[in-house]
Structures are given as C-alpha cells and as structure tokens.
Amino acid sequence: MLTGWRQQMLARNLSRGTVEPRLRQVRALVEHANEYPWAWSLATVDEWFADLRSVKGVARSTIRSLQVSIRQFCEYLTDPAYQWPAVCEQHFGSHPIQPITEANRAAHVADYEGSPVRRAFTRTELATLFEHVDAQACARQAEGVKGWATVFRDSVMFKVAYGFGTRRNETRMLDLVDLSPNPKASEFGDYGVLAVRHGKAQRGSAPKRRGVLAVRHGKAQRGSAPKRRGVLTVWPWTADVLAQWVEQVRPMMEHHDSPALFPSERGPRVSANALNRRLRGYCDELGLDPALGFHSFRRSYVTILFEQDWDPRFVQDQVGHEHASTTSLYTCVSSDFRTRTLRRVLDATAAQIRTPPTVQEHP
C-alpha cells in the first residue's frame, strides 16, 4: 500500500522531501493503533490525535498536517481504480474507509497560528539596532581591533534583510552576482535589483537536482527546488549600504575571493546559526524584546511598504508570496502610523466643519 501511494505521489511530481515524511506519518498511525489501514475507523484516528494533543502537546498546525497525510493516503486506498477495497475484502473480510471527515477534521479558523509574540521591529528599534552595530564597527576600527569588518558585515546583512525583505537563508546565500542594475531606476547604480536564488521552496514543486549543484553549499540538500525571484531596490540608502560594503569593506575580508556576498571570517559563507547568535547578542546588549528575530526584518519591510502606500501586489511580488493573504499576515501597522492616520482624518473633518458651505446665487 505504501509503495503504491509513494509511486502515486511521485507521479504527481511531489518531491521526496514531501513524500517521505508523509509515509512516516502513516507508519506512525499504524504503530500507535496497532492496526492495519483496512481496520481503521474514525475512533482510531480520534484516539491518536487526542493523544498527540493532550499528552505530547503537538501544535495545531502539526495535527492538520498529519490529518492531510492520513486523508490523502486513505483517498488513495478507497479509490476503486487502485483496487485496494476489493483486495482487502477478499483477503481480510474488511475494506479501508476514509477516517478523516468533516466530523473530526481539524478546523483552520485562524489566519495565523504562530507564536503571538513574534512581531516586526519598530522604526525606533531598527534605528537603535543599526546605530549600535555601526558604532561597534567604527569603535573597533578606530582602536585597530581585529574583526571590525565582521561587525560591519553583520550591520550590512541586517540592513539588506530589512531593505529587501529577505529571509535569513535568502540573505546568507546571496552571491555577488546576484546584484545588478535596474534599467528603469538608474539612480541605484549597480544595486537596483537583488536576485534571490534560494527562496523558500513552494510545496509540491519539482525536486532539487542532485549532484554538484545540490551539495555546493554543504551537505546534500533534499526537498523541493528553491523558489527564485527578483527584488527591486525601493530605498536609496540600501544601494548606498551595498556599494560601501562591496567596494570598500568586503575586499578586506579574509575570504573575499568567495562568491558569497557575505563571507564568514572562518569560511566562504556565514552560517544560519552564527547569524542568529550575532543578532540575538546585539539585541540582548540593547535590551530589545526577545521576541524579535531575523524574520522580524522581513515583517518590518512589509509593514513599512504598506504604511508608505505601496501597491499591495507590488509588495506581494517583492517578498515572493504566492497569495496576498500571506502578505497580509506580515503587516504589523505601527501605532505611530495609526495615530498619524487618525490625526489626518480628524484634521480634514475639522477643516470641512470650519469651511462655510458655498451659497448658490440665483439670477
């Protein structure tokens, strides 16, 4: 049964990174229930999910993912075209059913189910963080302390993540060749477009190619192919930051011959864990909210673009979201913006009240 379902999923062009976890999830239910799929009932899966929620504390999103796998597996088993109902009835006197129905299916009623403490940086927090890291780099350079360029690199990485709305892995995997001019915005020079080649993979996309390309950045990568996109520069200061880094500071790095835009002091590229530790260290030094992380730069980018009245479709394309509803989840409109909006409306209303109506003169 699992072999046949595996072949069906591969025929649907699902990646092995999607197929193998689904097979493991079905095996987990078999192990828990101690029953084969043709003996499953609604009570069988209800008991499993109740145990996962109440005893093991599994997240709601994980429960939904498990239910999707079990439901699709049982759709395959109950499809007469695959003949499993007839085979099971002949050999076991029973046949598989669909144990995930509207009666016990986990509802998806909330748009966002992540941790509620996660949020965007405020403008003040961003300014404080950037000024703090820049000051550390300048102080180390003035004192002749080794490693000042590394601190400067951290500052540029944070600013790029905020200035282009890139994720952590998208930022660290950028190469020098990913920077190019925008013919429609020549004022940004050589830094008008940022090519993101290691974006978050779209579920169900074709698997990554194996071989040299699949292992060029460390251990062999599995799963769906990364989604690519081009991000346009929207703020002039981002081009200035990149120009200073690429043309003046990066050549001083030990691994400046690496293709990476942000080489490490110990290797050709900064690791994700090192990036997290460094950001967390700077935030702790400033006493910033522990809820702030690298993804907060991306949230801030989306939020500020919306506050500046950029077209929603443009923002969606910039951050590479498939659906506009996903982009809306990143919007954390600041209290300052709401206050300014309220003040503008109140002032306009007051002006209308103070302006006397025009009297029409009749001949």
Image: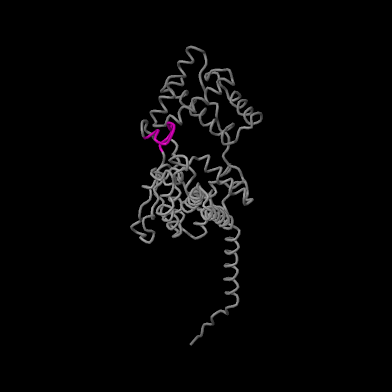
| Quadrant hosting residue 80 | top left
Quick one: which residue is furthest to the left in this view?
Answer: 183
Q: Which residue is at 60% across, 68% downward?
A: 346
Above or below — where is 8 with respect to 320? above
Q: How many marks?
A: 0
Question: Is residue 223 rendered magenta in the image?
Answer: yes
| 30 relative position to 200: left or right | right
Quick one: which residue is furthest to the top in this view?
Answer: 91
- State the residue in front, 95 or 312: 312
- State the residue in front, 162 or 134: 134
Q: Give the range drawn in magenta.
A: 213-225
Quick one: which residue is furthest to the front in this view?
Answer: 144
| 5 relative position to 342: left or right | left
| Quadrant hosting residue 338 | bottom right
- State the residue in front, 314 or 174: 174
Residue 36 horizontal/vertical position (percent): 53, 18
Which color scheme did the rendering employ for the protein?
one colour
Above or below — where is 300 with respect to 355? above
